[in-house]
Amino acid sequence: MQTSTLNRLLLNRSLAAVWHPCTQMKHHETLPLVPLARGKGVWLYDFDGRRYLDAISSWWVNLFGHGNPRINAALADQLDRLEHVILAGFTHEPKPQKSGFVSLANSYHGETLGALSVTDVALFKDTYAPLLMRSTQVPSPDWRLAETGESPAAYAARCAAALEHHLAEHHGRTAALIVEPLVQGATGMAMYHPEYLRLAREICDRYAVHLIADEIMTGFGRTGSFFAHQQAGITPDLLCLSKGITGGYL
């Protein structure tokens, strides 16, 4: 079978049988899919041998290039030993009264129901609002929102004061604060001063509230340090990594 024919067959089969996530399927009538045969480094190849630059790292997933020989060898070695990891028996004492979550205004944390509940981007959230649990948003330390003449650090401190005001009243029912460290991606790459993370860590400790760092976008060196929260000299209680930690293999 000629490769161009295989390309067309795979394209038609995908459109007929696969519901592509985060996609308006009708768009593919004029913006066709690209069936891929293989990848190497930063390049992807279709069945006709055409080469495409993977400029978004397969949607922020692939950090070290496609077909990385070191990663492939490590995975093959692990598969010969044990094919899964299980954390059975690891748990914690429940706190049923602490069911509330706090996130930053304009935050994005994903599109499953729990993650969408702490997201504050209307484009993703509004359609599913009746299905979501309630959460609270506090002011974002996004530099662009500072007053004229107000430094990024001063604005970060002002936003942290608003966080403390909320937790002082509601910490008894608040389980965690979740933040995108240093950069809020989906709202337009909104950047903020590390001082906010340092103060948020102190405030969460003061009121016995967990701090969750969502580093799905910022982790693994994307902001300079290995993790973005390290630039504030803090350690979160929970660290979300997803995409980058799997490298696209899972």
Image (tube, grey):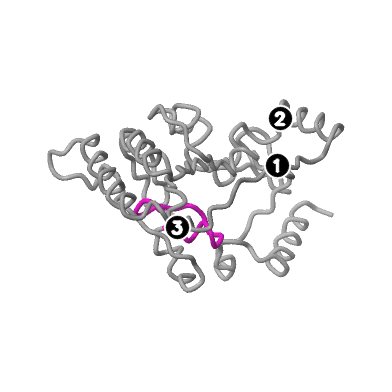
**Spot occupied by residue 155 in the image (x, y as percentages of width and height):** 22, 41
Sequence-first tag of 1 and 2: 2
Q: Using the image as rendered, state which of residue 214 and residue 96 is in the foreground.
A: 96
Tell me the amino acid under the disc marked 1: Tyr
Q: Quadrant of the N terminus?
A: bottom right
Question: Where 42 sits versus 135, above or below?
Answer: above
Residue 100 numbered mark, or none: 3
Q: CA distance from mark 1 to mark 3?
A: 34 Å
Name the residue tied to disc 1: 249
Crowd class of label 1 (few under 14; some 14 to 19; many from 20; radius 10 Å): few
Kindly indicate whether the residue at mark 2 contacts the one at mark 1 (C-beta within 8 angstroms).
Answer: yes
Classed neighbour count for the residue bearing mark 2: other residues with Cα under 10 Å, few (<14), some (14–19), many (≥20): some
**Dot 1: what SS?**
loop
Q: Give the label on residue 71, or none.
A: 2
Local crowd size for mark 3, using a 10 Å CA cut-off: few (<14), some (14–19), many (≥20)? some
Say whether residue 79 is left or right of residue 104: right
- Residue 117 sits above or below residue 107 on the image: below
Instruction: Specify whether 12 is left or right of 106.
Output: right
* Three-letter amino acid code of the residue under disc 3: Gly
Whole-angstrom CA distance, mark 1 to mark 2, is: 10 Å
How far apart marks 2 and 3 lie (CA) works out to 39 Å
Q: Nearer the viewer, residue 232 or 190?
A: 232
Q: Image point 25% across, 39% down: which residue?
A: 157
